[in-house]
Amino acid sequence: MLKQSIAAVLAAALAIPALAVGEGDIAALRGELRRIQEQYEARIQALESRLEKAERGMVEAERAANAAKAEAGADSRPAGENAFNPAMSAILSGTYGRLSEDPARYAITGFIPPGNATPGIRGASLKETELLFSANIDPYLRGNLLLAVDESDAVSVEEAYGQTLGLGHGLTLKAGRFFSGIGYLNEQHPHTRDFVDAPLVQRAFLGDNYGDDGVQLKWIAPTDMLVELGAELGRGRNLPGGSRMKNGNGATALFARMGGDLGNSHSYRVGLSTLRTATGAAGLNGNDVDLLGRAVVNNFAGDTRIWGVDFVWKYAPRGNAIQTALQLQGEYFRRKQDGQLTYDADGALALTNTDGYASDQSGWYLQGVYRFAPRWRAGLRHDRLNGGTVTIGASNLANVQTFQYDPRRSSAMLDYSPSEFSRIRLQFSRDESRQGAVDSQWFVQYVYSLGSHGAHKY
Amino acid sequence: MKQYLIVLFVTLVAWMAGTPALAALNVFACEPEWGALARELGGERVKVYDATTAFQDPHRVEARPSLLAAVRRADLLVCAGAELEVGWLPILLRESGNGNIQSGRPGHVEAAQWARLIERPSVLDRSMGDVHAAGNPHLHLDPRNIAQVATVLAERLAQVDGANAGYYAARQWDFRTRWEAAMQRWEREAMPLQGVPVAVHHKNWGYLLGWLGMREGMVLEPKPGVDPSLAYLAELVARLKSAPVKMVLRTAYQSPKPSQWVAEKAGIPAVELPFTVGGSERAQDLFGLFDDTIARLLQALR
C-alpha cells in the first residue's frame, strides 16, 4: 500500500514538468537560455579583459623582476678582499715560420748595433705571450702592468707604470716603465700590429719597441683639432741607449702630434719626434761581418740622436669600419751616432781594437691595410733602410767593413678575424736585410685575446 | 734644427686649430640619442659634440684623435655605459688629462646607471658572443628610460654649470611635459603592434619591443656580434615556417643583406629603423626618432 502510494506520488511529481513543457512554455525557456548565454558572454568578456590586464601586468612584473635582478646582481658582487681585482687579460700568440735563410745568422747589414736581430723562428713557436693587469690605484692614479714572455721563454716587464687620472688642463703624467710616445707604432704592443713583425727601421733603430724607465708628461691643447705635446726623461735602459750607470737623465724624448677628422669618413694623425740617448761605457754588442768576411762581435758606445716623422690616415665609409676600411701609415726616422766602435769586442779573434765611429743613417716604411669583408683584411708593406754615411776611426779601417747597401723588405699579409678577440694571419716577406741574401719568409700567426675587453689606441 | 721644426710645427698647428669657443658648456655625447637629450635640456647654453653617428656601431668605434680632442675640452660627458663604449671611451678618458669628466665626477653621466637594464646574462663567457655583463646597454629605445636619464642629466648640467641651473630646470620641466604627452600618443598609436612577433638582426631592440609589447621571435645573429652565415640564415627561414614573424628589424649601421635575404625568403618586410637620432630623415631629434620608428613599424604591419 505504502509502496504503491509512493510510486504514485513520484509519478505525479515526474509528470508535472513534462506536462508543463508539453503545454508549451517554450518561449519562456528560450528567454531563460538567452539570459544565461548573455551572462556567460559578459563573464567571458570580463575574463578576457582580466587576462589582458594580467598579461600587461606580466610585462610590468618582468620589468620589475629584471630590475630586481639587476639590483640583486649589484648586491651579489664579491665583497671580499678580491672585490677590487684589477682588470686582467692575456694575449696568446704563436707563429709557424718558414724562412729560406738561417735566422741565426740574421743581421741588418751596415747597422750597428743590430737592434732586435731575430727575423722569426723556423717551424712552430710561441710568439710573445702577454699578461696585462690594470686598475685605478686611487682617485688620482691608474696603474698598468704588462708582463711579456718572449720566444725564448724569458719573462720581462714590458710596461709597469702609474698614470694620473684627469690631472686637469689636458696634462697627464706617467711614471715607471713604458713604451715611448715617439713615432706611431712604437707605443703599440706587438699583438696590435698589422704584420707579424715590426718594420725594419723600428727594428734597427728602436729594437722593435723603445721603452724606458722614467717619466712622461703629455699635454693636449684645448683645440678642436688634436694637438698633443709630450716629453720623456729616462735612464736610457734599452737600445739605442743602454747600460748607463750614471746619475741623472740618460734619454730624452720629445714628440708632437696633431690629428683630426676630414669629414665623416676620414681621420688622420701626423707626428714629429726626437730621441736622444747615450750608452754607458759598456756600449751595445752586435753580430757583424768584418772586412775579411769573418763573423765578429762589434760594440758601439756613444750618443745616438734620432728624429722622425709619422702619419696615419684611416678611411671608413661614414665612419663605419665594420664592412670596409682602409688604413695607410708610414714613418721615417733618421739616426746619427757618435762614439766609439770596439772591433772584436768579445776577443774571439784576439784583435780587439777601439776607435771612433760616426754614422748618419735613415729608414722608412709605408704600409696599407684594407678590410674588404667584415672579417677579412689584406695588407702590403714596404721597408727601406738607407746605409747613409759611416765614418770609422783610422785604426779600425783594416778591420771594420763599411757597406754601400740599403737593406729592404716587402711584405704582404692576409688576416681573418672570427671575432674581435681572435685573429689568424698569413704573411709573406721578401727580406733583403742582409747584403747578398734574399730571405723568403712565410708566417702563419694567431693572436688571441682573453679576459677583459681592452681599449685600443688609435 | 729639430727643436726649431717642432716649434714651427706647433705654431702651425695652433694657427690651424684656431681659438676654442669658451661661451657655452661643452658636452661630449657618446651616442646621438644622448647628444639630442643634452640639446633638449641645454638649449643654446650647451655646445654638444656627438662622438658617433647613427651609421656607426657604438660598440666598434676607434679612439680617434678628434674624439680625444673633444673629450679634453668637455665639461660634461654623457654616455650609455654598461660597457657599450668599452673599446674606446676608457682610453679617451685616461689620455684626455681632463678631470671634469672622469668616472665619479658630476660631469660623468652614464645612462645605464639610471635605468633598469634588461637581458642581464646569467653566465659570462665569450663563447656566448659579445655579451655585456651589465645587461643590454641600448636602453634609449624605451622612452621611459629617456625620461629618467633626462632628470639626472638636468641635475648634472645644473651642478656643473650652476649659473644656468634655473635655465636647465625650466627646460627639463618643459621637456618632461612634452615627452609624457608624446609617450601617451606613441603608446596609443602603437596599440596594433602589441603581441606582434618580429625577427631582429642584433639583440639591440629589447627595450623598444618590451615597451611596445612586441615579441622578439628570432635573432639573425647566431651569437651577439657574430655575423650570420648564409647556411644559418637558411636554417632560420626554415624555422620561420613553424614560428612565423611579421617583419625583420635592423639599424642603419648594420649590413642590410641578412635581414633582406630572410625577409625575401619568408615573404615579410625587412624594416630599417632609425635606431637613434640621425638614423633617418625624420629622426632629427628624440621625438622624431620615436615618431618615425612607430610609423615604420605600423607601415610594415599593414
Image (cartoon, rainbow, N blue to C red):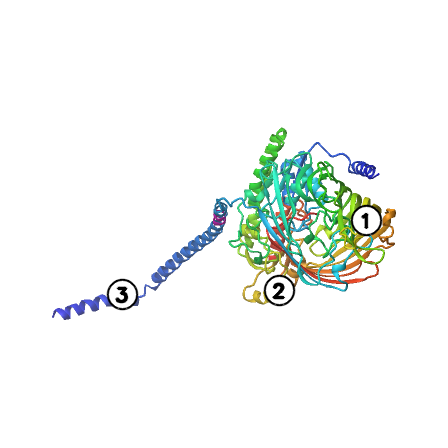
Q: Amino acid at mark 3?
A: Pro
Is residue A378 in view from this perspective? yes
Q: Quadrant of residue A171?
A: top right
Q: Nearer the viewer, mark 1 or mark 3?
A: 1
Residue that label 2 marks: B233
Q: Nearer the viewer, residue A358 or A446?
A: A358
Gap between marks 2 and 1, in whole Å? 73 Å
Looking at the picture, do discs 2 and 1 lie on one chain?
no
Asked whether residue B248 is drawn in magenta, I would say: no
The earlier-in-sequence mark between 1 and 3 is: 3
Task: Check if mark 2's residue and mark 3's residue have beta carbons within 8 Å.
Answer: no
Residue that label 1 marks: A353
Q: Vertical placement of A438 versus A223: above or below?
A: below
Label 3 marks a residue whose chain is: A
Q: Nearer the viewer, mark 2 or mark 3?
A: 2
Residue that label 3 marks: A17
Q: Residues within 10 Å of mark 2 (few under 14, many from 20)?
A: some
Q: Quadrant of residue A247?
A: top right
Image location of residue B61, percent across then percent down: 67, 49
Which span of residues is magenta-colored? A64-69
